[in-house]
Amino acid sequence: MERAALILRTLGAGAPRLGVTEIAQRVGLAKPTVHGLLRTLERHELVVQDVETGKYALGPAVLQLGNAYLDGSELRARSLLWADSLAQRANESVWVATLSGSRVIVLHHVFRPDDMVQILEVGAAIPWHACALGHAIAAYHPRIEELFEEPLVPLTGQTRTDREELEEALTAVRRTGMAVEDQEAALGDAGIAAPVFSRGGVVAGAIGVVGPAERLLGVRRNDLLLAVRESGRALSRDLGAPRSTSTYG
């Protein structure tokens, strides 16, 4: 079971298609073992094999499981009202996310309320160190050392990968209750996020706005910071976070 899970995580975290040799190298298993596990996963439609290249990718059953997870996520269910309200107030796209391994997974996405063509980002996975949502969660993560054990790969020339710089950023989050990212995940884009807590004061995820850096970090920055902070506080209360949660008071 653990070895099969490693294969699925490898296919979900790297290139869209990988060969048996590539998978074996990444998970540290012998090729015959990997081949047998892939055959089992293929029978259950958790992976599919490209008939031309022979390489493997995640299968349709993974999407079914993902949809079931979204349907059962209390964070996502509770965030629907608050995320929509924040999008209307900020006039920006809103993401709600949680942490899976070392990546932030977008659970809910409210489009910016205008007529521009936009792409639904639900299911998108972003390295925690490269986005405001990730910083907002990591600042309160109980196993922060595990996050620093993963490779901190730059996505742009702005991405902070130095541990000391990241620790300073997380300290700032704990001090202000807010995370700000300037073109670290994608050039031209920025993010402002607040942590979301659940029962017992445990960090459950984050909520934030994403959009062009010049718009988010310009003259509207303080207003957006306030709007995101208030949304994070409201969603945390809805999830049962105690009023003593230090970030929101």
Image: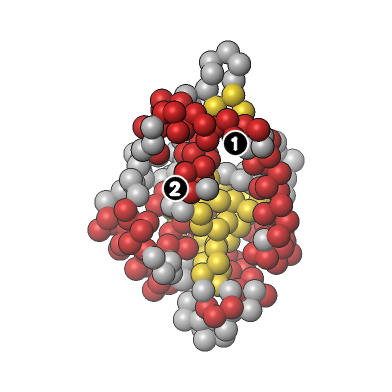
Disc 2 residue crowd, few under 14, some 14–19, many 20+, Cα 10 Å: many
Judging from the image, what secondary structure is the residue with disc 1 in? helix
Residue situated in front as seen by the camera: 156 or 115: 156
User: Quick one: label 1 or label 2, which is nearer the N terminus?
Assistant: 1
Residue 225 in percent (x, y) is at 52, 64
- Apparent side of residue 130 relative to residue 248 in the rendered image (left or right): left
Q: Amino acid at mark 1?
A: Leu
Q: Residue furthest top?
A: 52
In front of the other: label 1 or label 2? Answer: 1
Q: Considering only vertical position in the picture, is 81 above or below 11?
A: below
Q: Which mark is residue 75?
A: none
Judging from the image, what secondary structure is the residue with disc 2 in? strand
Colouring style: secondary structure
Which residue is tagged 2? 127
Which picture quadrant has residue 205?
bottom right
Which residue appears at 42% of the width and 62% of the height?
A: 138
Q: Amino acid at mark 2?
A: Pro
Which residue is tagged 1? 41
Residue 244 in percent (x, y) is at 52, 86
Which residue appears at 63% of the width and 53% of the height?
A: 107
Q: Considering only vertical position in the picture, is 52 above or below 56?
A: above
Q: Considering only vertical position in the picture, is 170 above or below 156?
A: below
